Image (cartoon, helix red, strand yellow):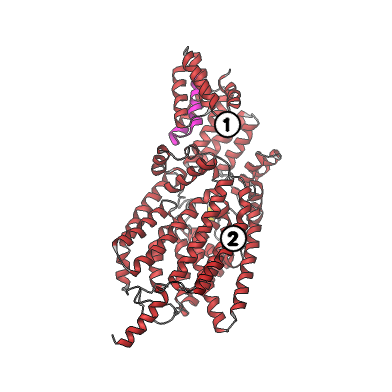
Amino acid sequence: MSRRTRRATKASSSTVASPPSRPTRLYVIWLLPLILATFITYYPARNHPFTNFDDDTYVTGNSQVQDGLSWATVEWAFTTDYASNWHPLTWLSHALDCDLFGLDPAGPHVINILLHLANVFVLFWLLLRATGMAGRSALAAGLFALHPINVETVAWVAERKNLLSMLFLLLALAAYRWYAAQPRVGRYVLVALLFVLGLMSKPQVITLPFLLLLWDYWPLRRMSPSVQGDRVRAPALYPPRTFTELVVEKLPLLAIVAASAVVTLKAQRAGHAVQSLMRYPLSLRLENAIISYARYLAKAVWPSSLAVFYPFPRSAPLAWQLLIATAVLLLATGLVLVGRKHRYLTVGWLWFLGTLVPMIGLVQVGEQAMADRYAYLSFIGLFVMFSWGVAEVAARRRLSPAWAKGISVALLLILAAATRHQLTYWQNDVALWSHAAEITTGNYVAEDNLGVALMHGPDMEQAIVHFRRALAIDPHNGLGHLALAGYAQQKHRWPEAIAAYKQGISEVSEVGTLARAYNNLGYVYLYAGDQADARDSFQRAVRLSPDLERSWQGLGASAQNSGDLASAVQFYKRANETRPSSLGYVLLARALDRSGRAQEAEVAIQTARRLPGFVDAQREANGLVGP
């Protein structure tokens, strides 16, 4: 290499290797108003309650999480496949919330907002350090911060897993740039560790090795770095590698991917969350995937009609819909290929397509056709395409920097207003599910959950209307039958509740739902005076979910009502070991007292007095086993 070539190479690499210039520092300062605007936009979520959709699974109905951080909670978090997932860091995060805030939803909502702000800042810094383009990086981070489609991830406490996994993924990408500058084992281990932490938060970040290959192509340019095109080139900072070498370099990460895939599928199958090909044929899944990709693109451009749940179609889409969606995807891909000298287009488009693959429904998990929360990661690719593309167009048209900044700020303000409006639908369950039912068709999940929300409000009689609408949409909707059963149970219509619970149990397969259904059925039998069927239902519940302390209490009550006081005492003790409660100790005290163990009964009742809800516990115990 000649001296002139070496000087040119050194000059080109220094544009990335050098510390931020004064204008770049100004952009970092200008990012602070974006952070503040994002916080102000999302702050109303602090006053929102928990939702009746998954928040009960993750927090309000999860006794392990409510016990807070302890060795028992850590052990449970790393060994459970509860909620059809293995994500121990997410469980521990919720447990820490309970330690800090109890069951006050304000704290978890604020933590979600702060995690989103952290992701915004790390995304900006990541793009800035990798490209040197501060303005474009700030715009991409702004779109990510304020696009309304991300409301679902930030405003929903149960989506803490999305926020955590994104943070670790972005940090892994940042660590990878550090590794690429000087490939060393220690730096690679850091990338792998951050990747594992992301997977332990939510397995959707399983696509990281694929993203690293895209990162090699642009902006790091470790792959064929001599090709001209984009303004950022750093062959001296990032030594060139062949494609094969780059793939081999990712093999340890791919091994982690394989292990995560096995664990995830095991957890999802254990929870019966993976849908069968009988229910959703492969042809229908492929058609829905194509339609969903196009719908995601439409929502990126025009973020309206955003719902917490989009039901999976039960029949094939119309031919013209499939044709238009296919044409849109092919056209976009063709434009990217034509403009391949602009590598950010290729990387952004493949980022969007590739990161959605695990959630696009080819392996159908759950009942949704698509979900706004899945865009939290995938839309970064589209935001990069837009930010860099608009900047290129502005440069060619010689648009003044003041105009470019003004248009960018105006766009972000419009998005912030739309985000603030979308946030209002999350202020309570009735608003959330009414909106979902209104803007979607055939949404039995929305009707079911709207009915559940109304059951706990002044319009309780309206709940039955929505439960019946849900069953009219899908007569095999197990959740609808279970909701009707719960309604009948509240009305003390025991035969009707028993029939509806049995029908619902025959239609559902998710383990947690089944366990709760058997538990509720057990209490219906208990109040109806059928001790044998009550005991059978509670036994089925604890076999499915041994941590249901209410089922252990029910087993104790059925045994006590049958005269088996020794078994009742053991069941109550097991309930209190699972999760101590005033009801558990009141029941234990009564069983001990009737067994002639007055001194032990006194200890139990004193323990009950020290726990919350003692008066209500006595009242409930009266209904279960008598005074």
Where residue 480 sits: x, y (%)? 59, 42
Q: Which is the main secondary structure of the residues drawn in magenta?
A: helix
Q: Work out whether mark 2 precedes mark 1 in sequence or the reverse, and give the earlier one.
A: 2
Q: Name the residue under label 2.
A: 36
What span is colored magenta in the figure? Answer: 540-561
- Assign the N terminus to one quadrant of the image: bottom left
- Comparing 365 with 202, the one in front is 202
- Comparing 61 with 269, the one in front is 61
User: In this picture, is 87 found above or below 63?
Assistant: below
Does the rendering let one see residue 295?
yes
- Assign the C terminus to one quadrant of the image: top right
What type is the residue that disc 2 sits on? Answer: Leu
Residue 299 covered by magenta stretch: no
Where residue 426 sits: x, y (%)? 63, 51
Residue 546 covered by magenta stretch: yes
Q: Which residue is drawn at 62% across and 64% down?
A: 415
Where residue 371 sits: x, y (%)? 54, 56
Task: For label 1, count other residues whose C-alpha is less than 10 Å away and answer few (under 14), some (14-19) or many (20+).
Answer: many
Q: How many labels does the image show?
A: 2
Q: Residue at x 37, y 66 (%)?
A: 178
Q: Which mark is residue 498?
A: 1
Task: For label 2, count other residues whose C-alpha is less than 10 Å away and answer few (under 14), some (14-19) or many (20+).
Answer: few
